[in-house]
Image (spheres, coloured by chain):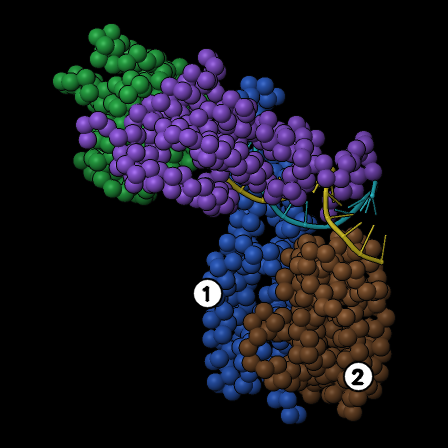
Chain colours: A brown, B blue, C purple, D green, E cyan, F yellow
Amino acid sequence: MPVKNSKSPRPARAAHGQRRHDLMKAGRACFAESGVEGTTVEDLLSRSGASIGSLYQHFKGKDGLAAALYLEGMEMFFAKARARLRGAETTADGAKALVRAYFDCAEEDPGATSFLIKAREYLDKTRYAAEIERKNAEFMPEVGAWFRQKIKARELREIAPDYIMAIIEGPARQYVKRWLAAPGAPLKEAREVLAQAAWDALRRSGKE
Amino acid sequence: MPVKNSKSPRPARAAHGQRRHDLMKAGRACFAESGVEGTTVEDLLSRSGASIGSLYQHFKGKDGLAAALYLEGMEMFFAKARARLRGAETTADGAKALVRAYFDCAEEDPGATSFLIKAREYLDKTRYAAEIERKNAEFMPEVGAWFRQKIKARELREIAPDYIMAIIEGPARQYVKRWLAAPGAPLKEAREVLAQAAWDALRRSGKE
Amino acid sequence: MPVKNSKSPRPARAAHGQRRHDLMKAGRACFAESGVEGTTVEDLLSRSGASIGSLYQHFKGKDGLAAALYLEGMEMFFAKARARLRGAETTADGAKALVRAYFDCAEEDPGATSFLIKAREYLDKTRYAAEIERKNAEFMPEVGAWFRQKIKARELREIAPDYIMAIIEGPARQYVKRWLAAPGAPLKEAREVLAQAAWDALRRSGKE
Amino acid sequence: MPVKNSKSPRPARAAHGQRRHDLMKAGRACFAESGVEGTTVEDLLSRSGASIGSLYQHFKGKDGLAAALYLEGMEMFFAKARARLRGAETTADGAKALVRAYFDCAEEDPGATSFLIKAREYLDKTRYAAEIERKNAEFMPEVGAWFRQKIKARELREIAPDYIMAIIEGPARQYVKRWLAAPGAPLKEAREVLAQAAWDALRRSGKE
DNA sequence: AATGAATGAGCCTTCATTCAT
DNA sequence: GATGAATGAAGGCTCATTCAT
């Protein structure tokens, strides 16, 4: 199969489903580089070799492409988080699971993680906000259940889910965001420091 | 060559020096409501009653107005944080100072706080990015010095400044962001929960 | 996010490929009438019936349209000049060729010639300056070679190219410019008077 | 008298007539550097230290300042041309007078000459066009009379004034314009080459 | 005479989206 | 399915000019 060259005067007819795939690939690259708002439709087209018509055919526009990729990214994170949570042998490991999943994502696919961190605000303004919220709402109970059970067993302090999420996600998100902007030291150390910090913040206090 | 209107209905010239103030007021309202990108120059003008010329005269554009307000907001936060930090009697109080300052801001001036949380990304793309970074860099050492001293005195565990900031700011930021989007329970409880969590995360050895 | 109008009266989509042509036609008319700076984008749009989008799609703006027309005009002049120069049977005819070509242009297409005389300054401030200079630089050597050869053959006085161009173009340009501003007597007489003057100024002096 | 420093916080009250003078000086500098259209009112103000109010008080705007300087420049040129014409001992010297005056100006005051060459187009669009034309019309007859007399005395060929001006001014103007844009060889040689060329073009019968 | 805050007409440009082929 | 010319709402900005002080 001939390599697709977007500069060739007569772009060969694309293979079936090729365009959709090309556009997603271009979207991953462009959105990771410049963010969703910073990427223009033209950027996506020139990078993918697809036509504006194809973008609308497959995704109903830039927002649709961004939403598709966002859902894909959420899936990736949820998969990692589920694996970590299920594999947890101690309560500490479980509390650290989401933090570690966050760092796993950043390490394995920095572009996608950057996109996940930054694209939500954009998507919340689009017609896909509800769909994303729905997908998110599907996952949260799984985590919530785990924590509720540990609290009930008095292995974690009594604390509302909103606080739990803030304590777990907040530092990880902030650290990873900065790291993605200017990657410095390897993520492994940070992962364990912040995972431990989350665990320290959540577990039952000796004094309280 | 503009202005040849002896036709205009009645310009209604504003009082001298009023416009700068009008524009800042309009900026606070518009940016809090819709964000900087979501606010158009026209929004600012109609809300303030000022002319486009005045906006450029005083602030060199929407970005300049946003920057002026951002610096003002930073000042507010720094003032609160400094007060909390200086007033701290125990190490725990100090560690909790920034978290509490965050919540103080959100409670006292939700609009300004929302703007502080969301406008940075926009401003980082403008000519004012450096000035903001500079102002931020003026404050950070004050905080850093406090923590370094406590670490030296072995009242806090050995931990790098980046982690400290992530642990302190991350949860507060995330929680406040959500609260601002959909204000629910009073902030006071959350403030103490997350302040305590930050303190727990910072002091504990991780071995216990 | 633009376009939500199911209200617009009736867009009247133009035939495919028509717009580029429409815009060039409007550009010729507007620029000849009012100069490039005196023509607004809106003038071009209302005269051509095209949309602002089409102007940018095809020419990247007013400057691009002006540049396209300028290059077209240069081509016209060069074609006439080449024809006159190649058809020259005597040295006198050759020396007169460019002057005559200048007047030919003014007579055949006054609008385009006016534009050629006046638009250069505008275009020199645009991103197209280099392209125009390049095209010009392609032609000059052809003329230069002809004159050098005649000087070598001692049929013209020893004189540097810069002076030759000033002597040939200067009077023609000045006369044509005034004539275009206020067309008076037919150009034919002026053409021959100034052509002869150029030849008189360039040919070998009796005394030298 | 203290030197005026436009950066001083409290600009001292200017001496009587000082502002008018400051503005003309700034105008000469700015217009020579950037042309009239390329100079903004703000440029004039910051360079002169005057206020916008003063500009309007003394000159009714940028156009008025440009017109005042243009009239001043015309005076300079006319003075030089008159001197050369009156001092002419031979017919050749007279024919060469204007060309030489052009180069004299360029050499003595390149800025003013550049301004004279380029500002006319701008001024023709202003309320000062008539005044400038009137001043020009005062001078032309002096030159015209000289040439008419020489033609009558059969020391010059029969040739209409418009052609004379094109032959004399055209090459000088074109050469000087280029020289001002990129000053190269000293002007003295060019002056004599083009003066001789003008004389050759005017005296020769065309039959020789 | 001098000042400068206030003004707003006018201009250019970007970019998501539609639709005939 | 694919293409891309055509569209136009929306937005940002410059700069000469006015006028109360």
Asked if badge 2 and badge 1 are on a common chain, one would say no
Task: Name the mark nearer the viewer: 2 or 1.
Answer: 2
Please tell me the numbered disc located at residue A83.
2
Q: Count numbered badges in the picture.
A: 2
**What chain is tagged by disc 1?**
B
**What chain is tagged by disc 2?**
A
Regarding residue B205, the answer to whether it shows in the image is yes
Image position, residue F4 (x, y; %) = 73, 48
Q: Is residue E13 above or below residue D88?
A: below
Image position, residue A190 (x, y; %) = 61, 82
Q: Amino acid at mark 1?
A: Glu
Image position, residue D176 (x, y; %) = 30, 33
- Is D119 displayed left or right of F7 in the figure? left
Badge 2 local density, few (<14 within 10 Å), some, or many (20+)?
Answer: some
Task: State the image quarter where residue A84 is shown.
Answer: bottom right
Which residue is depicted at the point 61% across and 81% down?
Answer: A187
Local secondary structure at mark 1: helix
In the image, B175 versus C175, the foreground residue is C175
Regarding residue B190, the answer to whether it shows in the image is no
Q: Which residue is tagged 1? A: B138
Q: Quadrant of the C terminus of chain D?
A: top left
